[in-house]
Image (cartoon, rainbow, N blue to C red):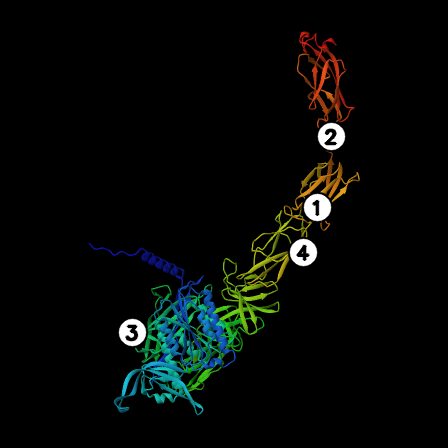
Amino acid sequence: MRIQPKIPLLFILFLTLLVNSTITYAEENSDLHVDFNATPSQEVIVKPTDGNAKASIDFTIIPAGEVKEAKRPPIDVVFIFDKSGSMSSTRDKLQNAKDGLTSAVQFFEKNKQPNDRFSLITFSSEIETILPLSNDLDSIKTSMLHTTAYGGTNYTDPLRAAKNMLRDSNNEKYIIFLTDGQPMIATAVEKVKKEECTRPFWFFCGETDIVESDQQVIYDFQNRYNYNRWLHKIFSPDNSKLKSLYIPSAFSMDGISFKTGWYNPAELEANSQQMQALIKQKGLEVSKELYNSKITMHTLGYGEGDLDDRYLQMLAAQTSGSFIKAGEGSVSGAFEKLANKINSVKLDGEVIVPLPANVTVDRNQYKVVNNTVYLPLSTVYEAGQGAPSPITLSLPVEFMAKGTYTFNNLKIRYKTAEESAWRYTVNKSVTIQVKDDAPASVTGKLELNKINQELFNLIIEQGKDTSSFTGKYQLEFGGLVNPNAKGNLSDITIYQPLPEGVEVEAGNGISVENVDGQRTAVIRLTQRVNFENGAFSKPALSANMKMKAIWAINNVKMPQPKVSYVDSRYGTKVVSNLNPDQSELSAKVRTRQYYDQKEYAYDGYSNGTIKKVRVSGQGETTVAVLEPGVNNGYPNKAVKELTADSTQLTITYKDGSISVLSFVPALTVKDAVTQQVLEDGAVISNQAEFYLPTGVPGDDVNYQYRILNEDEPIEGWAAIELQEMKTLDMFGENEVQVRASGGFALENYIIGKTISIEGDDLIRVPSIIELYVGETKSFDIDVFPFGKPNNNYNVKVIQGDDGVINSEYTRVNSTKDNRMTGLSPGEDIVEVETKNGKFKKNIRVIVKSRFVDLESMEFTKSKYTLLLEGNDFDIYSNLIFNPADATNKNIKAVTDTGNGIVEITRENDVWKLIPKSKGVTTITVTSEENPDIKAMAIFEVVSEEDGGPGSEEGSIDGRW
């Protein structure tokens, strides 16, 4: 029986999480894809008798889909920083570059993920600093503080060091390479022939021989300076004498061509152009190594010095990276732009071009496997920016024989970083005819140039020409293989499709037309170019066009231009492709505001982002950022215009829609009872409530408020949150003031509303208070705001009609503990008045005496019959007092007619009658309070023998 191995549960869970996270990540970017068009540079070309026919296949790659939120995989980024001597050619050049790199580091500090790693390599003639890959960016900022400029410029060593550092990484791998000059030094392992000693003799060599081996070689364009010129040198580190150097692949660089074969180093050293071509070629070889190691390199050409923009563009393109040209004032923006690319979602791919027979390409420049060319491409989806700009790639091809050539099965394979398998486009084909003779060829290129702003940092600002740039079209004429050819080229017209957001300055033969459904700038050249005896009267023509960005754009590339013309020998229009400029155009919209003696700029971007920038001299610091989104109500649209006034920024988008960004919070005041929203200056008789329904965009915005009352001291500023309800409860005129700080807020800018709380109902007191002399009663005085402690009133007791103050007012501690004490019987008026004297209420106070006079007193009956042998008779319980609550109901005396019928007793103030003998008597009771008040009744005492009190015979009533 086979026993299956047990897989640990944690491992299974790990794999499940890994697969699920990858699937989730892939699904989010599953709509990202590309399509492409392929066209020949010219459909019919001529084969020279002494060489190959040359053309190109041009690919327009069209990315589709968009990324709402950038969720990228972990990254490794190596910053390579040129610190050669030319970096100190101006006073602030080096410092500006250091500040720019630091700004990129700060960008990654805000956006880095736990598994991201970063490194720094500084170089001149050789590598100076190599920091290990780490998630801690502080070491890079610290290293920048101590970087100084000196030495030459060696591209190859730092690039190889970065490649070796990134070799085993599983992260997405990037290099950001900054330089201000062309390479002057290069190192490479080359096949050489050198002189070596084959028979040593003591300290001498008895015999030498030429040995072929692989050897590290150093190419030094400026090894030393002598007699007013630089001396170049090709050497090996061991100083062995090089006899021959082998060039393994043919190549051309800057018009200098090398064929495969052995070369004499001394002859190469004597030719400056050959030396520089060799050094540049070594850099291209390293960039190919980077691409094979799946490393993307972005190059940054810095300053206005000895830069070769085309070469830096080639270095980046070979790794599917991008090139940016930056001046001293824009290098921070360039670094941040590249950092933002790396922080975005990348889609990588290759254009696959199977080569037909008799077709060749420069195998030293392009990746060729089994006679199939793989052109690298990469496009970056920045969050909220929509689909990236189309990419144009050109593959130069050469035809060794005449014929019709069809390039079949042209396709693109591509994938995002999280995908493991390639996706493929549909196949397409291109046909080129190579003939003995054909219309003359017109080739050329578009070159974009800045006017006042770098192309990646165009600024659309009213009254300033900072969004403009120029396009220079350079046309070259050729293709005349017949030495007797004579004629002319006429109707030469350049067609430049225009991307959205770019406008052309029309006039002077330039118009904007709809060509094949595309808004196109059309340049009609008036010149005719004559040719005779197989030669052109003019080998080249150029045309210029001024363009400008009209709304915010991001990483837009000019589409491939075309040229059409008529060769008089054939009479038909011929169309050829021109090489486009690969520079990326980006523009932002800017307006300025001066506040509190400071200058601020507000910038709008192609994805709707708004930034607030503090401008100080030549420096700019971003102080607030508004990212568009559904949650904040600002759309993800390109900004076309910004207008700032004292309290708000009006944003106009490319589609004409408008949003408003307020620099101050909104303040709403309501009647607390009716909930009616109150305007400034409103008068109410209730307390009010106020809150901030909306605030100021940006991070770390704080809000404060205070209330100014006409009768109260100014309160200090207190914190308030958005939507937090506060109460306005002081009568009189009140001003609610609010201010905000941070984000887009105008510091110390105060907004306010004035609300007056007035009316007779602002004091609540009892209408009447009744109490006895000596009695103290508590009562409420509730002065607005009701229900809260409030000392904002005074109390005064005013005598009544009797002209005497009969009561006394006191307040004990609590503002609610108001007391009245009765002093004497009578009535007073208590006046309660607000301290400002505007409002008052009166209380009627009645003081009563606690003694109730006895008005009368009488027995419950007029006549009583008592039994001689019966119980004692209680006098008090048989009396009726009027009023019943009389204060003194005591008996002063009880008397009878004195005939001994009853005995009158008093014990503990209890008066009783005790029957003594039969007969009739009159009892008189005298009041203690008033002797004139008496009660009288007739009493008859009888015995049982007489029949008792109820008998007819014995009753006194019966006898009467």
Disc 4 crowd rating (10 Å Cα; few below 14, some 14-19, many 20+) is: few
* Residue pictured at 30% horizontal, 87% vertical: 194
Q: Cβ–Cβ below 8 Å for labels 3 and 4?
A: no
Q: Are marks 2 and 1 in contact (CB under 8 Å)?
A: no
Mark 1 or mark 3, which is nearer the start of the sequence?
3
Q: Nearer the viewer, mark 3 or mark 4?
A: 4
Label 4's element?
loop
Dot 4 amino acid type: Pro
Element type at marker 2?
A: loop
Q: Nearer the viewer, mark 2 or mark 1?
A: 2
Residue highlighted by disc 4 = 713
Q: Residues within 10 Å of mark 1 (few under 14, many from 20)?
A: few
- Quick one: label 1 or label 4, which is nearer the N terminus? 4
701 displayed left or right of 870: left
Q: Position of residue 154 (x, y in %)?
A: 40, 80
The residue type indicated by label 2 comes to: Val
Mark 3 = which residue?
Answer: 370
Residue 863, placed above or below residue 479: above
| Res. 852 mark | 2
Q: Comparing marks 3 and 1, which lies closer to the viewer?
A: 1
Image vertical order of residue 790 relative to residue 706, above or below: above
User: Mark 1, mark 4: which one is toward the viewer?
Assistant: 4
Residues under numbered marks 3 and 1 in contact, where contact means CB atoms less than 8 Å apart: no
- Reading the image, the residue beneath label 1 is 760
Mark pair 3, 1: CA separation: 100 Å
> Horizontal and vertical percent for residue 738?
61, 58
Circle 1 — which element? helix
